[in-house]
Amino acid sequence: MKSGQIHTPITSGSPGGAVGARRDATRVRMHGRRTATLAGLTLLVLLLPLAAPAATPGIPAFAVQSSGGSQTYTLTIELLALMTAITLLPALLLMMTAFTRIVIVLSILRQALGAGQSPPNQVLIGLALFLTLFVMAPVLNKIRTDAVTPYMAGTIDTSTAVERGVAPLKTFMLSQTRESDVAEFVRISGGKGYASPQDVPLSTLVPAFVTSELKTAFQIGFMLYIPFVIIDLVVASVLMSMGMMMLSPVLISLPFKLMLFVLVDGWSLVMGSLAASFYH
């Protein structure tokens, strides 16, 4: 050390000392949290064997009557059946309601407009869901009246409620399914036909209904595409005649397509036509 210079040690009041103190405090807090977490986990592991025997006798059970006697199921099986039914709800929504036709037509309409991701997927799905509820409202009301309300009142059993609840859905699907599609799946399954449409099982009716819905949705989408394709052709021809071949026709035709769609009140026409297509 040179003469005249004074060496000052770093204390907690200096910047370096403050940083070191904060680091030490952080380490202490992290160590305390880890210790508390480890202690909590250890206590939970020790208490689990004591809590399990006490909880087992309290599990509620329900009995199902059958011709061979009664069968008792615990709450675990009931929850498993409920979770399985919940996982099947999206498939039921897609395959047995008007949702398939509506969402496909709206997707084709967005592609025909050429507006990219406008409207976004969330808007299209939400619009399709609410329009599906509007179309299926009479069917849902009949299911509630004939099946759900009597079952909740205890006047009918589970099998009767399921039969009454499926009947309105079968009537709706049969009214929207082409006979040729039903006959095709009956032929594939090796059946010889049925006495009445109501005798067609769901295993045959559901794929036939979905096939008919896809066909109808693409037919409606084709009709929607025609005016927008005409606008694209006209704009492309005009640009080519003016020698503006470097300019993208889509960039020019998009405002005209949007203006045409707004002037004719396109959304009301499309939604109204979609809803009316299920009642013709």
Image (cartoon, rainbow, N blue to C red):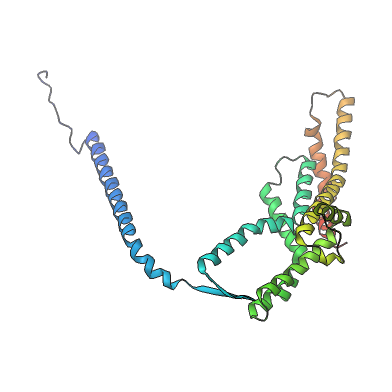
Q: Please state the horizontal and vertical placement of residue 258, each as a whole percent of the image.
A: 80, 43
* Front residue of 4 and 262: 262
Give the percent coordinates (x, y) of residue 241: 90, 25
In the figure, 155 relative to 244: above or below?
A: below
Using the rendered view, name the quadrant where residue 272 is placed.
bottom right
Q: Position of residue 221 (x, y in %)?
A: 83, 47
Q: Quadrant of the C terminus?
A: bottom right
Left or right of 80, for residue 188? right
Q: Is residue 175 above or below residue 248?
A: below
The reply, left or right, for residue 33 in relation to residue 214 is left
- Res 176 seen here: yes
* Residue in front for this viewpoint, 5 or 238: 238
Relative side of 262 to 7, left or right: right
For image coordinates 80% across by 51% down, the residue present is 211
Identity of the residue drawn at 84% across and 59% down? 176
Q: For the N terminus, give its image quadrant.
A: top left
Examine the image and state in which quarter residue 108 appears.
Answer: top right
Residue 265 appears in the rendering: no
Which residue is located at x 66 percent, y 50 percent? 122
Q: Position of residue 15 (x, y in %)?
A: 24, 35
Residue found 84% across the figure and 43% down from its top: 225
Asked where in the image residue 207 lies, by quadrant, the reply is: bottom right
Q: Above or below — where is 33 with respect to 173? A: above
Up/down of 37 relative to 56, above or below: above
